[in-house]
C-alpha cells in the first residue's frame, strides 16, 4: 500500500489502483486536448504531475495504447495519437454500423425504469447547454459533453450486448477528441437539439425503428459538421494518424482559431 496525490486528492492505493486513476486522468486529458496530437509523453514527467511512481504511469500508457489514444514506437517513445480527417470519417462510419443497431435493440428491451433514466440524462444534457454550445466556456463545455455522453450511453444501455457497449464507448472517446478539437463545428450544428429530442421520442414511444433512424441521422449530421470544418484545415487534414504534428501550438489550437 502506498500513499500519493492524484489530482490534488490524497490517496492510499496499490500500484494497480494508481494505474487506474492515472489512466482515467490521462484519458480525459488526451480527449480534452490538454496534450497536443503527436506530443511525446514522458512517464517520468507524468509521474511527477500525478505524484506517483513511474510504474503505474507506464501501465496506464500501455492501456491507452491498447485503446489507440497513444502510440509507442522505438526511438520515438510514447506519443499522443494524431488526428486526421480520414480517421474521423472512419470512426463515424464504424459508429454508424454499431450504434443504430445498439439503440434498436435497447429500445426493444427498455422498461419504465430505463426510460426514466434516459429522460433524466436528457434533462441534465439540456441543462448543461445542449441548445447553446456556442455560449459555453471550456469548463462548461466539458460538463456538457459529460452529460451528452451519459444521455447517449443511457439510450444504448439495454441493448443486451457488452461488446456493442464496449465498442461504442471506445469510439465515443475517439469521437470526442475531434469534437473538443472542433467545437466550432458544433456551434454551426443547429439541429443537434432537435436530433436529441427525436432520439428521446423514439425511446419513450418504444419505437425501435424511429430511434434507430434518429440515431443514424444524428451520427451523419455530426460527421458532416466535423468534415466541413476539418476539411478546411489543410495542415490538420494532412496529418497521418501515426505521425505527430510539428506545429507547436497544436492541431486543437489551430482549429479553435478558425
Image (cartoon, rainbow, N blue to C red):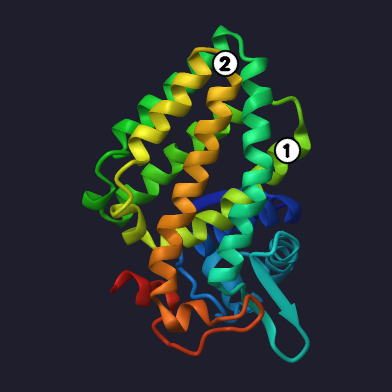
Kindly report which numbered mark, 2 or 1, lies closer to the viewer in this rendering.
1
Q: How far apart are marks 2 and 1 (CA)?
A: 18 Å
**Residue 149 drawn above or below residue 80:** above
Q: Do the residues labelled 2 and 1 touch (CB within 8 Å)?
A: no
The image quadrant of residue 127 is top left
Q: Mark number for residue 114?
A: 2
Give x and y (percent) for residue 161: 76, 30
Q: In the orientation shown, which residue stands out farthest toward the left?
A: 135
Q: Mark number for residue 164?
A: 1
Q: Nearer the viewer, residue 161 or 232?
A: 232
At 29% from the left edge and 45% from the top edge, which residue is drawn?
A: 190
Q: How crowded is mark 2: few (under 14 residues within 10 Å), some or many (20 or more)?
A: some
**Residue 244 drawn above or below residue 87:** below
The image quadrant of residue 80 is bottom right
Q: Nearer the viewer, residue 51 or 159?
A: 159
**Residue 248 drawn above or below residue 81:** below
Q: Earlier in the sequence, mark 2 or mark 1?
A: 2
Residue 157 can be seen in this image = no
Give x and y (percent) for residue 21: 62, 52
The image quadrant of residue 130 is top left
Q: Nearer the viewer, residue 6 or 216?
A: 216
Q: What element carries label 2?
A: helix
Residue 203 can be seen in this image = yes
Q: In the drawing, does residue 109 fall left or right of residue 148?
A: right
Give x and y (percent) for residue 89: 58, 61
Q: In the drawing, does residue 228 fall left or right of residue 164?
A: left
Q: In the drawing, does residue 18 fall left or right of residue 178?
A: right
Q: Quadrant of the C terminus?
A: bottom left
Q: Is mark 1 on a helix, strand or loop?
A: helix
Give x and y (percent) for residue 5: 54, 57
At 40% from the left edge and 64% from the top edge, which residue is drawn?
A: 228
Q: Which of 242 and 2 is in front in this view?
A: 242
Amino acid at each position: 500500500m502506498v500513499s500519493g496525490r492524484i489530482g490534488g486528492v490524497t490517496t492510499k492505493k496499490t500500484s494497480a489502483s494508481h494505474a487506474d486513476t492515472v489512466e482515467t486522468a490521462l484519458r480525459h486529458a488526451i480527449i480534452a486536448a490538454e496534450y497536443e496530437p503527436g506530443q511525446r509523453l514522458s512517464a517520468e514527467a507524468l509521474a511527477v504531475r500525478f505524484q506517483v511512481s513511474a510504474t503505474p504511469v507506464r501501465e496506464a500508457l500501455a492501456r491507452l495504447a491498447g485503446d489507440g489514444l497513444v502510440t509507442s514506437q522505438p526511438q520515438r517513445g510514447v506519443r499522443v495519437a494524431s488526428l486526421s480527417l480520414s480517421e474521423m470519417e472512419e470512426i463515424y462510419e464504424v459508429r454508424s454500423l454499431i450504434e443504430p443497431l445498439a439503440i434498436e435493440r435497447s429500445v426493444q428491451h427498455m422498461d419504465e425504469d430505463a426510460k426514466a433514466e434516459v429522460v433524466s440524462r436528457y434533462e441534465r444534457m439540456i441543462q448543461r447547454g445542449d441548445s447553446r454550445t456556442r455560449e459555453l466556456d471550456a469548463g462548461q463545455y466539458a460538463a456538457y459533453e459529460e452529460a451528452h455522453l451519459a444521455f447517449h450511453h443511457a439510450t444504448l444501455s439495454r441493448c443486451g450486448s457488452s461488446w456493442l457497449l464496449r465498442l461504442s464507448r471506445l469510439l465515443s472517446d475517439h469521437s470526442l477528441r475531434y469534437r473538443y478539437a472542433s467545437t466550432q463545428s458544433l456551434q454551426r450544428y443547429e439541429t443537434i437539439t432537435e436530433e436529441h429530442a427525436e432520439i428521446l421520442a423514439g425511446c419513450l414511444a418504444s419505437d425501435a425503428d424511429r430511434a434507430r433512424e434518429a440515431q443514424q441521422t444524428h451520427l451523419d449530421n455530426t460527421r458532416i459538421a466535423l468534415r466541413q470544418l476539418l476539411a478546411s484545415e489543410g495542415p490538420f487534414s494532412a496529418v497521418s494518424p501515426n505521425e505527430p504534428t510539428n506545429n507547436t501550438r497544436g492541431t486543437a489550437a489551430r482549429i479553435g482559431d478558425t
